[in-house]
Image (spheres, helix red, strand yellow):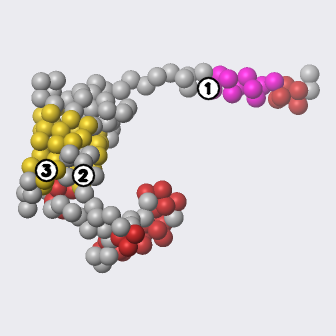
Amino acid sequence: MSFRIRSAFSLPLFSLVLCAGCGESVERPQTIAVKGTVVYQSKPVEGAEVSFWGEGAPRAATGVTDAEGKFTLSMFEFNDGCLPGKNVITIRKMEAGAENAAVSEEDMLADPLALASAASAQDSGQGPKSLIPEKYSDRKASGLSEDVSADNNTFVFNLAD
């Protein structure tokens, strides 16, 4: 058998062996369904991004508030919740509008100049404005944390200035 013929048969066989483990499911940590409400100045906050940062979690569980300020969290799948245990919470609500439109994450990843431009706009005060106190968007300064358990998974955040 010639080298070309052997190579033609070996490559597909090698590819099958290489991908043999590709279909296995990855075990994810247990999550607990979490819901809640965000209120600022005695009014529900619509369109706020709520993130629960669990200790040692691979990512934050996130949700967006509706017109009533209500949210549900998603971490790995839609509305699956967050990790049980202590979670630091951040809440962010930015001003919308064409004049203050932020550069998308995809644009920033694809173009380093877009990232630099967005950072420059934010530093100069030209970027989107926070509609709630900015401290709530910083994990170290938010002052928000909750211990999530099967018995304790509904939260109300009354934000203050």
Q: Residue placed at 26% from the left, 68% from the top?
A: 129
Q: Which residue is mark 3?
A: 39
Q: How many neighbours does mark 3 have within 10 angstroms: few (below 14), some (14-19), or many (20 or more)?
A: some
Residue 46: which numbered mark, if any? Answer: 2
User: Residue 106, position in %: x, y?
Assistant: 48, 56
User: Residue 66, position in %: x, y?
Assistant: 26, 46
Q: Are marks 1 and 2 in contact (CB under 8 Å)?
A: no
Left or right placement of residue 129 versus residue 87 in this view: right
Residue 19: which numbered mark, if any? Answer: 1
Do we see residue 139 in this rendering? no
- Under mark 3, the amino acid is Val
Left or right placement of residue 113 versus residue 93 in this view: right
Rendering quarter of residue 97: bottom left
Q: Residue placed at 29% from the left, 43% from the top?
A: 63
Q: Which residues are drawn in magenta?
A: 9-18
In space, the residues marked 1 and 2 are separated at their CA atoms by: 45 Å
Element type where label 3 sits in the image? strand
Q: Residue placed at 60% from the left, 21% from the top?
A: 20
